[in-house]
Amino acid sequence: MEVTIGSGSEIISQAQAIRYQVFTLEQEIPKELDLDGLDESSIHALITVENQPVATARLTVNGDGSSTMARVAVSKAHRGTGLSSKLVEAVMNHAQKIGVCSIEIHAHSYLKDFYERFGFKYIKEVEIVGEHQLIEMQHNLART
């Protein structure tokens, strides 16, 4: 397993392919909602297993030091193996390293307990995407 953090066209293309499988095909979320125009200005985390991309997440950093983690996706065959935890940890570590002060997420409501384990705090219910209720959560990072 290898974790890569970057913003080049190759990592974006691999991330979008995973997201297409997970969000568009499995969760039936329209592709247009996934492709929101923020990929090129964001940082992407990509996990590969045996040189195959299997998990991804995106971090969009704002000018004030806040950020949004989004598009967290793990391919079906690799769920339940701890990759999502490794992915979130990698994004959080990178965010802290580059001076981000907070990370906000809009996660599926059933993932509330998962994100709380990383220190995220529940804020409120937000939009429904497809048939999925999302919740807003936030984590303030310690300054190093």
Image: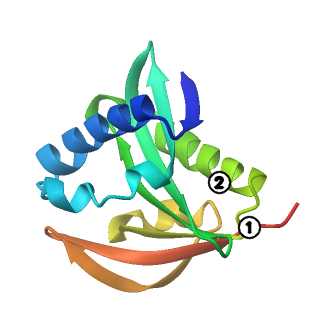
Crowd around label 2: few <14 · some 14–19 · many ≥20 (10 Å): some
What amino acid type is highlighted by mark number 1?
A: Leu
- The residue beneath circle 2 is 92
Contact (CB < 8 A) between labels 1 and 2?
yes
Quadrant in the picture for the N terminus:
top right
The mark total stands at: 2
Q: Who's the residue at 27% across and 35% down the image?
A: 17
Q: Quadrant of residue 138?
A: bottom right
Q: Disc 1 on helix, strand or loop?
A: loop
Q: CA distance from mark 1 to mark 2?
A: 8 Å
Choose between 76 and 36: the one closer to the eye: 36
Q: Is residue 9 above or below residue 49?
A: below
Q: Is residue 78 above or below residue 115?
A: above
Q: Quadrant of residue 142?
A: bottom right
Crowd around label 1: few <14 · some 14–19 · many ≥20 (10 Å): some
Counting from the top left corner in percent of width and height, residue 57 is at 45, 48
Q: Is residue 61 above or below residue 28?
A: below
In this rendering, position of residue 24 left or right of residue 89 = left
Counting from the top left corner in percent of width and height, residue 32 is at 16, 58
In this rendering, position of residue 140 left or right of residue 25 = right
- The residue beneath circle 1 is 141
Q: Is residue 79 visible?
A: no
**Which residue is farthest right?**
144
In this rendering, position of residue 128 left or right of residue 10 = left
Display colour scheme: rainbow
Q: Who's the residue at 28% across and 44% down the image?
A: 19
Quadrant in the picture for the C terminus:
bottom right
Choose between 34 and 121: the one closer to the eye: 34
